[in-house]
Structures are given as C-alpha cells and as structure tokens.
C-alpha cells in the first residue's frame, strides 16, 4: 500500500489491555471508522503463531479501509502476514539490517529520542520516525520524556516524516502544536475510550490543527 507522510496524521497503536466488551478486531474497526490513517499492531506477549494469525486478520481489515498496517518489532510476522511495514525501537533490530531483508516498498519506522538517533535512522533507511515520549505514557512508564522544543529540533533535523508519541490525549495534544511533526501516535486515548470511533474522529481533527504549518 502506498505510503506518504499524510498517512501518519493519526497513528493508532493497539493495546490488548483495553480489550474487554469488544474484541481487538472490533476495536480496530471502530478506530478505522473514526478516521485513523495508519495502524500499528503491538503484541508483546502473544505466541508467534497467534500473533501471525491476528496480523493477517488485522491487515485484511486495515486494507478494506485503505489504511497501512505496521507491525511492532516483529519483522517475520510483518513479512509473513503481508503487513505494510514494521516499527522498531532503539533496542530492537537495526534499521539497516531490516532494510537489507525487505524491499523499498516495505515501510520501516523507528523510534528516536535525540537528533543523533533520528539522523542515524534516516541514513539507515527508515521511512518515518516516532519521536518522544512527549508526555508521561501509561503504556511505557519508564520512557524518557522530551520537551516540545526537543521534539521540534528532532523533527526538523531529518527529511523523512515524523510522529509525536507518548501519552498524547485530547486534553494535552495542543501543548505540542508547532512541534514540527507530521502526525500524532495514540494508544489509550483511542483504544481506552468508551467510544473509540468518536475519540479517533476528535483526535484526527486535533491532529490536523497541531500539525498545520
């Protein structure tokens, strides 16, 4: 599926902690109906076969809505499932090594917390960066925080598109306006919401405003 920076406007990241009354697939579809522009499937504790089976189902759903699917960390699952790409943290597989395994059309995202990390990832073949954490994150309690000024410095140091990540919600997203990013990545503010579809729609409108200019 074609990838462009507009795909990053509202980047939703799944979290099984919020699965309850609805299945993960039902939650994903609600998010897609709300206007999510790219989706990352993150499963830290599923067995490989179960992860792959789930990834195939989520990929089919995402592609029905013409939304790219990114797999967190697991390159093998990403390739076998037909996902559009993979996102890796600094402690995961090196971007350069992944790029050697995959074609140019395969999307590689990387996390960056400094200008040096951002520039290294870009040179290694990353297609986009997740920059943060910009706020305290309930999913990564030990994540290193960066300021809005640092966010802008990192985002403007590279030519590839960027998303701000880490604890972003409807209540605080305005604080990072002017941060130089092309989109926002959200976990609990979408999947932890009572009305996932409405939350995604509201966040998308906020994302348009905070990334404008």
Image (cartoon, grey):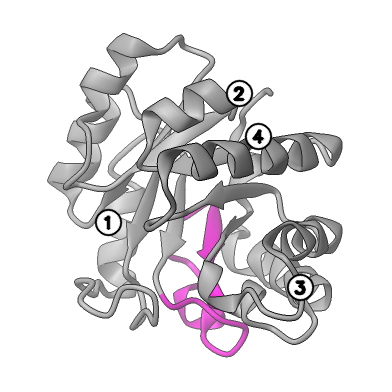
The residue at which mark 1 appears reads as: 153
Image location (x, y in percent) of residue 181: 47, 55
Query: Between marks 1 and 4, how big is the CA–CA gap?
Result: 37 Å
Residues in magenta, as a range:
167-188
Query: Is residue 180 visible in this depiction of the protein?
Result: no
Give the mark nearest the N terminus, 3 or 4.
Answer: 3
Numbered tag placed on residue 22 in the rendering: 3
Locate residue 154, reporting x and y percent: 28, 52
- Residue 122, how many percent across, how many down? 29, 30
User: Earlier along the polypeptide chain: callout 1 or callout 4?
Assistant: 4
Q: Quadrant of the C terminus?
A: bottom right
Q: CA distance from mark 2 to mark 4?
A: 7 Å
Determine the CA span between mark 3 and mark 1. Answer: 40 Å
Q: Residue at x 71, y 40 (%)?
A: 57
Residue found 25% across the figure and 65% down from its top: 150
**Between 176 and 11, which is closer to the camera in this rendering?**
11
Query: Gap between marks 1 and 2, in whole Å?
Result: 34 Å
Query: Which-is-in-front pick, marks 1 and 4?
Result: 4
Q: Nearer the viewer, mark 1 or mark 2?
A: 2
Q: Secondary structure at mark 1?
A: helix
- Quick check: marks 2 and 3 in contact, CB under 8 Å? no
**SS for dot 4:** helix
Q: Is 30 covered by the magenta stretch? A: no
Residue under numbered circle 4: 56
Residue drawn at x 84%, y 41% as measured from the top left = 65
Report if the CB atoms under discs 2 and 4 are less than 8 Å apart: yes
Q: CA distance from mark 3 to mark 4?
A: 19 Å
Dot placed on the residue nearer the N-terminal end, 3 or 1: 3
């Amino acid at each position: 599926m074609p990838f462009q920076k507009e795909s990053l406007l509202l980047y939703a990241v799944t979290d099984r902690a919020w699965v309850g009354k609805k299945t993960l697939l039902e939650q994903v579809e609600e998010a897609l109906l709300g206007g999510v522009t790219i989706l990352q499937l993150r499963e830290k504790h599923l067995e490989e076969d179960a992860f792959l089976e789930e990834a195939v189902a989520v990929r089919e759903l995402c592609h029905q809505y013409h939304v790219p699917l990114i797999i967190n960390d697991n390159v093998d699952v990403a390739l076998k499932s037909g996902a559009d790409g993979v996102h890796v943290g600094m402690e995961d597989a090196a971007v350069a090594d992944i790029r050697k395994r995959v074609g140019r059309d395969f999307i590689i995202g990387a996390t960056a917390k400094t200008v040096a990390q951002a520039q290294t990832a870009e040179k290694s073949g990353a297609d986009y960066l997740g920059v943060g954490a910009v706020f305290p994150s309930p999913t990564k309690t030990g994540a290193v925080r960066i300021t809005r000024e640092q966010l802008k410095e990192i985002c403007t140091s590279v030519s590839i598109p960027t998303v701000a990540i880490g604890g972003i919600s409807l209540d605080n997203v305005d604080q990072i306006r002017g941060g130089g990013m092309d989109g926002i990545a959200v976990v609990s503010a979408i999947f932890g919401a009572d009305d996932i579809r409405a939350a995604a729609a509201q966040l998308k409108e906020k994302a348009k405003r905070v990334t404008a200019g």
